[in-house]
Amino acid sequence: MCSKLKFLMPLMIALLLFACGDNSQPTQSNTPTQESQNEIAETEAQLITRARGIHDRVITLDTHNDINTDNFTADKNYTANLDTQVNLPKMVAGGLDVTWLIVYTGQDTLDTAGYAAAYANAIDKFDSIHRLAEEIAPEQIEIAYTSNDVRRINAAGKKVAMIGIENAYPVGLDMTNIEDFYNRGGRYMSLAHNGHSQFADSNTGERDDVWLHNGLSDMGREAVAEMNKWGIMIDVSHPSKAAIMEMLDFTRAPLIASHSSARAMSEHSRNLDDEQLLRIKENGGVVQTVAFGSYLNADKNTLHRDALTKLNESIAADLGIELLSFAQRNALSEPDRTAYVASLAKIDELAAPRMDAEVNSVAPPVDVGDLVDHIDYLVELIGLEHVGISSDFDGGGGVSGWNNAAETFNVTLELVRRGYTETQIGMIWSGNLLRVLDDVQRIAAEIQAE
């Protein structure tokens, strides 16, 4: 004991001197020394280097990227760095390996004419995706139909395209179209979008409490069985809660939310509440957290949008430009619309140097941190193996720090900052979603064998 006290005495004296201070010495600055600054910079550099390595090794997969078929022609396509959030140069720059390109159809009338137009729209988008991968840039991107395809194509150094179907409305009343869409490469499909379909009610019914089916229609229940049979993942990102709960009751396979977040974190009918999330966990499915500002933090997003609107209105007033609503803009003639779009570009140009001082400092934008906050919440509630990532790029998605595919690394970097391991990050980015796809296709084979 004496030897220990003898050892500790100098240390105790030093601590007392430190606590009391020495008035004969100059006051020490709180500013880090150059040496400590270098150590901090090296630590940050090491973290970024480690995150880069993880990002390069895992397969990064984004389950929801909308498309415009005008960008899938021989003269204008994703081999160029178009003014789109996703294209091949941006995927390469950001290290995004897999993009789910979306066959989206807006909801229209539930009649023969509506179904015919919707089907034509869907086939045009299917054909466009195949054109890119099979005719325009087969050496750069290839369509995957299974998880093994994803790994094979990625190992070959090419980007991977997969196909999701947003809204089953184009199926019409012909249920054989579900098999047809599977054969065209569709690997997930939602039974409704923003509006009630022939299969299911939409989340948008919450606005006016008007419902068509009070969940699924009889055809919707049949569609669940058909999707299970052919190996198409059921996507619950847009249907109503009642419809989603019925899908969970009737499905024999795990399902997904291709681009949704946690309602407990941000109130929006497109998000999933805890009851739904826990049922998806029980089902073995996966929720692909989406980088959509109003879904991630509605209040923060509104404040930022209001501050931006105020700035734009001020600039527009100085230029003598009247800002129009979407309806007013759509009512313009083609020449007038072109001129109006040019005026908006001028406003954006003048707003850019004022954004930090007048918008971001007053009302910060929704960012990657908000996205990973939802990931943290979901991991805590339903388990890491049920959580994934999506952007909804070119469909309204994108947040500060991940506003296009070229910025994809920033998501991995934030996950590393939060303490996620490489194995966990690989599961979140792609492993969980591909596991569900495997399960769905295995169950489909079993059903077909029956």
Image (spheres, helix red, strand yellow):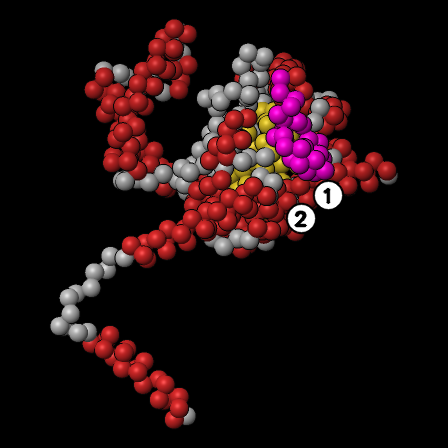
Q: On the picture, is 242 further left or further right than 2?
A: right
x, y percent for residue 319: 23, 17
x, y percent for residue 330: 42, 14
Name the residue at 55% across, 11% down. Answer: 75
Residue 241 position by quadrant: top right
The answer to whether residue 138 is magenta is yes
- Whether residue 269 can be seen here: no
The circle on residue 284 is 2
x, y percent for residue 191: 63, 31
Asked whether disc 2 touches disc 1, contact meaning CB atoms under 8 Å apart, the reply is yes
Closer to the observer: label 2 or label 1? Answer: 1
The amino acid on which the numbered mark 2 sits, given as a three-letter code, is Gly
Residue under numbered circle 1? 439
The answer to whether residue 355 is magenta is no
Q: 256 or 53, which is in the foreground? A: 53
Q: 124 or 354, which is in the foreground? A: 354
Chain part drawn in magenta: 136-161
The amino acid on which the numbered mark 1 sits, given as a three-letter code, is Asp
In the image, farthest residue toward the right: 450
